[in-house]
Amino acid sequence: MLQLVEERRLALGDSIERWFPDAPNAGLVTIEHLLRHTSGLVSFNALPDFGTQYRPPAEIIALGLAQKPQFCPGTNWSYSNTGYAMLGALVERLEGASFEQVLAKRLIGPLALTHTTMRRPGVELPVVSGHAGGRPVDAPDQYATPHAAGALASTAGDLVRFWHALLGGRVLPPATVRRMFVDMPAMLGPYGGGSASYGMGVQLYDVPDGPGLMLGHSGGIEGFTSVVAYVPADDLYIAVSFNEKKVPAEAGLWSLLRAVRAWRVLR
């Protein structure tokens, strides 16, 4: 989305009314609200009867937009996968190509992310199975339902490669990258635990009794948790992916970081 903004194909302050006229508060919700999760739109996967069967992008967007907004746009924060699915649909309309093709052209190919691809319904990939409490989870949709909100298969190595490229100015101009990390509201509920804030597709963590300050993003889906981050104090990039929903990837990151710090002291 920010590449399209740089190309003047749209602006962060554009309302979504042009593309999603039937959305709640369509004239008030902007592209930036969707990116920052401050739109107030309900996340489709938060609905109690959502299930695990495959649903196409248009359906999950419609489910989210059919719900009463949680708050007035820009007045609060709540993670909304509906908003990111909408952004993916918007990318497809502007580019005239599937989201998978756009990612391949703009990011996966140029950054040589050779172990990263979009999940598609009915397409098996050579990946590990997700687990919850040690038991394999059932994912009949092949994790394709979230679309632009999380239907990506990747590796910790590719996550680090991408994050290094983003923060290094190879994906967006440095000034735009910095803007992603300003005006960040605290992440509420189970997401931040009081230690994280959210920008435009990015998170800023501050854990004084742990890693300290980190720039990154956490993620989770049924059977998996993941995190990628840059730790300025150590000048270190770390990514962790677990195929166990009940084990937070941040715990793995902290274990790796402690080991690196101890090794550097011994040197």
Image (cartoon, rainbow, N blue to C red):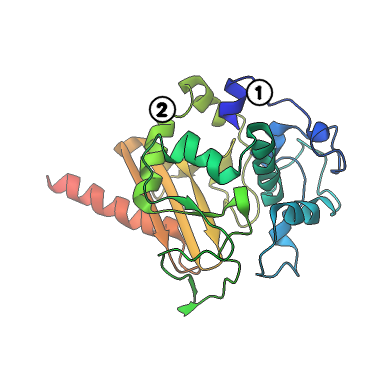
Query: Nearest the camera: 96 or 41?
Result: 96
Q: Is residue 10 above or below residue 87?
A: above
Residue 253 relative to residue 1: left or right: left
Cα separation, mark 1 vs mark 2, equals: 20 Å
The residue type indicated by label 1 comes to: Arg
Q: Position of residue 94 (x, y in %)?
A: 67, 32
Residue 47 relative to residue 240: left or right: right
Q: Helix or strand or loop: what does disc 2 sit on?
A: loop
Q: Tell me if I can see residue 203 in this picture.
A: no
Q: Outermost residue toward the left?
A: 267
Residue 33 relative to residue 132: left or right: right
Q: Is residue 143 above or below residue 113?
A: below
How busy is the neighbourhood of tag 1: few (under 14 within 10 Å), some, or many (20 plus)? few
Q: Are marks 1 and 2 in contact (CB under 8 Å)?
A: no
The residue type indicated by label 2 comes to: Arg
Of badges 1 and 2, nearer the viewer stands: 1
Q: Tell me if I can see residue 115 in this picture.
A: yes
Q: Position of residue 236 (x, y in %)?
A: 31, 40
* Picture residue at 65% right of the left edge, 39% below the top: 92
Q: Position of residue 135 (x, y in %)?
A: 48, 80
Task: Report the residue marked by disc 2.
Answer: 170
Q: Helix or strand or loop: what does disc 1 sit on?
A: loop
Query: Nearest the camera: 48 or 256?
Result: 48
Q: Tell me, for residue 63, which label it has, or none.
A: none
Q: Tell me, for residue 9, which label it has, or none.
A: 1
The numbered mark, 1 or 2, whose residue comes first in the sequence reads: 1
